[in-house]
Amino acid sequence: MATYAIGDVHGCFKTLQKLLRKIHHDPRHDRLWLVGDLVNRGPRSLAVLRWAAEQGDRIVTVLGNHDLHLLGRAAHVAAPKRRDSLAEVLEAPDRDDLLAWLRRRPLLHREGDHLLVHAGLFPGWTPERAEELARETEAVLRNGNGASGELVASNDRKIDEVWDERLPPGERVRAALAGFAKIRTVDSGGRMCSSFSGHPDEAPDGCRPWFSDPDRRSRGVTVIFGHWAALGLRMEEGLAGLDSGCAWGRELTALRLDDGRLFQQHSVD
């Protein structure tokens, strides 16, 4: 039995299946951790969603910003974007079941010293605090009321969120969602530089990767994340960034957690 963490799939179903064959994935024994962004940008989001929903507890997948965008599109609280490739999902006869399954995905998953999240963590969060905030935010996302719609809608806004324990509840879950689903760089005060998505070497003055903050409080675990295609594969002590740009014609990456071995499949989608 092995556990593999896999980077952003983004609707690249053929590439995913080829990667699974490369790692000799055995669904009877192996587990898969997906860093989110199952959908959008690539051509086969519906196939990816159907496959993932069929896997049951053999996979863990966290919500990414593109997954949230799909939920927003379906709820009519998010506008279409130029590169959206979500029409097939939104028009599918089983869309309601698939979207209900997607909405129930967590924002964070932790087992022992491994912590899975889509984008990252605010530097001020300990792993324990991040788990608490993930559960609080997930509860709002799943309740289906106006607060849920507003929270999903906030995913599509470029807001330079900053974490503060004194935030009122509505602002707290909005900032927490931005951390889990969208964070890349922060300034010296821990405020997100939300408009930047390029390589860290090109970051605006004063902005640095969230994981490079000298006071980051999540260093006691290995944070596995995706989201940042321009960063590319990033492996260092306590950190595994797995978005290697499959949707941009590059690779889809799998990391075997048991021994740290990496596997890659060039995009065939």
Image (spheres, helix red, strand yellow):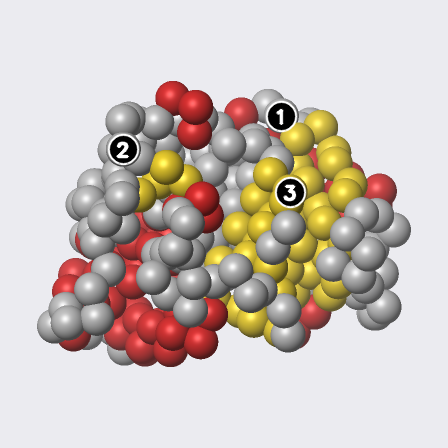
Q: Amino acid at mark 3?
A: Met
Q: Position of residue 5 (x, y in %)?
A: 67, 54
* Figure quadrant of residue 28: bottom right
Residue at 60% over, 38% down: 234
Q: Nearer the viewer, mark 3 or mark 1?
A: 3
Vertical placement of residue 184 versus 104, above or below: above
- Residue 81 seen: no
Q: Position of residue 30 (x, y in %)?
A: 80, 65
Vertical placement of residue 163 versus 242, above or below: below
Q: Earlier in the sequence, mark 3 or mark 2?
A: 2
How far apart are labels 3 and 1 at the CA level?
17 Å
* Mark seen at residue 64: none
Residue at 41% over, 49% down: 214
Along the line of sight, the residue nearer the viewer: 21 or 197: 197
Along the line of sight, the residue nearer the viewer: 80 or 154: 154
Q: Amino acid at mark 1?
A: Arg
Mark 2 sits on what residue?
206
How far apart are labels 1 and 2 at the CA level?
30 Å
For label 3, the SS is strand
For label 2, the SS is loop
Q: Residues within 10 Å of mark 3 (few under 14, many from 20)?
A: few
Mark 3 sits on what residue?
235
Vertical placement of residue 236 versus 176, above or below: above
Q: Amino acid at mark 2?
A: Gly
Q: Residues within 10 Å of mark 2 (few under 14, many from 20)?
A: few
Direction from residue 170 to residue 33 in the image, left or right: right
